[in-house]
Amino acid sequence: MKLAERMSRLGTESAFEVLARAKSLEAEGKEIIHLEIGEPDFDTPDNIREAAVKAIWDGYTHYSAAQGIVELRNAVAEVDSRRKGLEIKPEEVVVTPGAKPIMFFGMLALVDEGDEVIYPNPGFPIYESVIEFLGAKAVPIQLHESKGFSLDVGELKSKITSKTKMMIINSPQNPTGGVIPKEDLEAIAALAVENDFWVLSDEVYSEIIYEGVHNSIAVFPGMRERTIIIDGYSKTYAMTGWRLGYGVMPAELAQAMTQLQINATSCTCTFTQVAGVEGLKGDQAAAKAMVAEFKKRRDVIVEGLNAIDGITCLLPKGAFYVFPNITGTGVTSQELSDKLLYEGGVAVLPGTAFGSFGEGYLRLSYANSVENIRKALASIEKTVAGLKK
Ligand SMILES: Cc1ncc(COP(=O)(O)O)c(C=O)c1O
């Protein structure tokens, strides 16, 4: 089959490949502990599920406005203005099936062939994939373990050229769990204003934060008119399968994104949007309990990893991932993750699944029970000890 030339530039998420390999081992009768999956292991809170069922019976089963139902855009404006310390208007909100389309539509709407887009490495693989798909130049900025997996502002300056159209940031971050300190956000904002580029700020983990408060780059002077905030329900409310996300951006860009949505999906599922209003405005107890449980698991997994000879692990401030340094084991990220899957029965991702600067690291998701995390730690310790023999 001859696919369009642009398909050769489209990447993917290898998390799905590792999951498929782990599932086929399970089909052969092997026991696998899943630490590769980037989704909460909790159920969607009851109040949201009930709201969706009611919405179906109430007849919210037709197309909706392409930009998103007014009730949900009002709810985002109200709740996210408070959460992010901004003044968001409903016309600045676009609702999409998951947060991912905001990434895709945002770049489609703003980035031309030949433009340069700076993106975090290690980082969510879809950023690089979409940049290259569009024929733009993907310019990686390294995240450093020594900086709590934030970037070096001096290094960032050296990456900016007259062709820089956009920079992507993600805090709290996948895969490292790192949070960009406020002073770094401020420095990035100043560079964006000075050099006139857009910032695509992926804030899908903004409500899963363990120390301090979430800071959005959009609060800094001159940033509202050049920032697209990506947020959604997948992580905050354990709703990955519902496909509900949104973007906050200047109203003119929201119109362009809506046009892209009309061309691509028509609209986001209508009863899911109604349930989304309950998600943002209803009882937050279940979401808060989930974060408290993640924090306990984070502490268990970080302590356990640091106790293994050859592995060191920073304490992440957000999301539900750890990114341990495995250089002391003497093997590559890919070798260790393969060994852990096939010999240790633990599915994890090599750091390189998130870019070349992920070499020397693994990504483990602690969206699993403390019991399974402890079992996985014992298996990782045994596998790593076996390397030295
Ligand atoms: C950093 C980041 N952004 C966006 C997404 C996509 O979220 P959604 O399920 O809302 O499309 C993910 C999912 O893993 C993610 O890790």
Image (cartoon, helix red, strand yellow):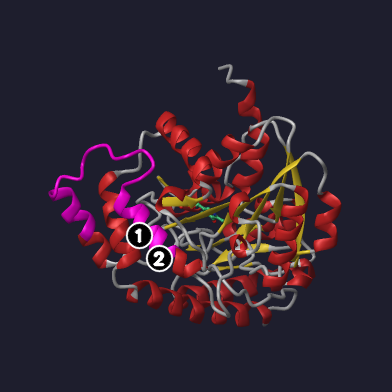
Residue 385: mark in rendering: none
Q: Residue 127 vs residue 51: left or right?
A: right
Asked whether 303 or 250 is in front, the reply is 250
Tell me the magenta residue range.
51-80
Name the spot of residue 153 as percent of width and height, x first: 80, 62
* Magenta stretch: helix, strand or loop mostly: helix
195 up-or-down from 388: above or below: above
Asked whether 96 or 3 is in front, the reply is 96
The residue carrying mark 1 has its beta carbon less than 8 Å from ligand 1: no
Quadrant of res 347: bottom right
236 in magenta: no
Which residue in the structure is indicated by mark 1? 75
84 up-or-down from 97: above or below: below
Name the spot of residue 31 as percent of width and height, x first: 46, 62
Asked whether 197 or 293 is in front, the reply is 197
Residue drawn 72% across the image and 74% down it: 311
Residue drawn 78% across the image and 72% down it: 146
Q: Is residue 337 visible?
A: yes
Q: Could you tell me the amino acid type at mark 2?
A: Val
Q: Could you tell me the amino acid type at mark 1?
A: Ala
Q: Residue 223 vs residue 15: left or right?
A: right
Quadrant of res 288: bottom left
- The image shows a total of numbered marks equal to 2
Residue 79: mark in rendering: 2
| Mark 2 burial class by Cα count in 10 Å: few <14, some 14-19, many 20+ | some
Give the CA separation, mark 1 to mark 2.
Answer: 6 Å
SS label for mark 1: helix
SS label for mark 2: helix
Quadrant of res 115: top right
Q: Is residue 43 visible?
A: no
| Mark 1 burial class by Cα count in 10 Å: few <14, some 14-19, many 20+ | some
